Amino acid sequence: MAGTTLLDIKGVETYYGNIRALNGVDVNVNEGEIVALIGANGAGKSTLMMTIFGAPRARAGKITFSGTDITQMPTHEIARMRIAQSPEGRRIFPRMTVMENLQMGASLDNLKYYDEDVEKVFTLFPRLKERIAQRGGTLSGGEQQMLSIGRALMARPKLLLLDEPSLGLAPLIVKQIFDAIRELNRTQGLTVFLVEQNAFGALKLATRGYVMVNGNVTMSGTGKELLANPEVRAAYLEGGHH
Ligand SMILES: Nc1ncnc2c1ncn2[C@@H]1O[C@H](COP(=O)(O)OP(=O)(O)OP(=O)(O)O)[C@@H](O)[C@H]1O
Ligand SMILES: [Mg+2]
């Protein structure tokens, strides 16, 4: 049912000690969408991603997933709602092999789908299959990103959160990662909420986008609208690919 709200973030405030990093953020993600959150370093993008999982916890506001209030839910229970993430910096297990990393992502609720799900990840990222027994820490940056996304997919998420999937990667690899996200969305209807510094790529990929400045959402619109917006262009697309 495209169009139904899957994730609804309302008036969320998050603090680190006394410092407020999110000042009442409203964001919503509908089923079947790819939504991009762009903004400068330190804007609060990762904080918003982490607040969805309750670490750090929102001090005000409300987060609803599939109609359930998850604002105060323990993090492991939030994960069981079938929200999965590839966090900033990828955070794969460096000493474990590719296969073991994927195993770590599988949820105990879905073990009967395990073989099928591993195959799906390898179809999406054939590079990982070639490196099945290699330790995570020895993979290239792009391969680690593929593994991080693959591990998140093993949880059979309804919502996939991606924090800077393109960070530090060469253009060709960025394209592969973005193509994979588009493919997951198109063929499996997977809903994706991604944070990106690569505003151009993210807004091209996204159904809708939000711009965050200093802990506030300052603009939102369709990917196309934001790409065409003069303020967005001046602040985030200057010297970009056009
Ligand atoms: N663990 C922490 N303790 C204290 N302050 C923090 C912590 N994590 C983040 N902050 C601060 O909160 C603000 C938002 O940081 P956040 O990491 O969410 O930004 P971001 O938009 O993801 O930036 P980037 O694009 O650089 O990843 C920053 O001022 C940052 O210094
Ligand atoms: Mg960040």
Image (cartoon, rainbow, N blue to C red):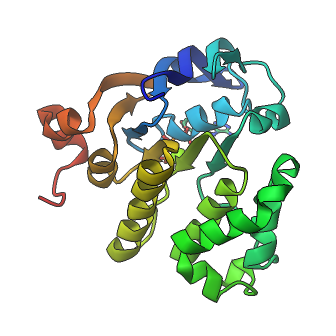
Image x and y of residue 36, in percent? 40, 40
- The residue lying at 63 percent from left, 13 percent from top is 62
Q: Quadrant of the C terminus?
A: bottom left
Is 198 on the left or on the right of 97, as rendered? Answer: left
Is 55 on the left or on the right of 29, as rendered? Answer: right
Image x and y of residue 153, in percent? 65, 55
Is 76 on the left or on the right of 191, as rendered? Answer: right
The answer to whether residue 97 is above or below residue 6 is below
- The residue lying at 33 percent from left, 34 percent from top is 208
Image x and y of residue 217, in percent? 39, 23
Image x and y of residue 136, in percent? 71, 77
Query: Outermost residue toward the right?
Result: 108
Is 134 on the left or on the right of 87, as rendered? Answer: right
Q: Quadrant of ligand 1?
A: top right
Q: In this orientation, does residue 68 appear?
A: yes
Closer-to-camera residue (80/164): 80
Number of numbered discs on residues: 0
The answer to whether residue 190 is above or below residue 219 is below
- The residue lying at 78 percent from left, 18 percent from top is 72
Quarter of the figure with residue 123: bottom right
The answer to whether residue 89 is above or below residue 216 is below
Closer-to-camera residue (153/138): 153
Q: In this orientation, does residue 141 appear?
A: no
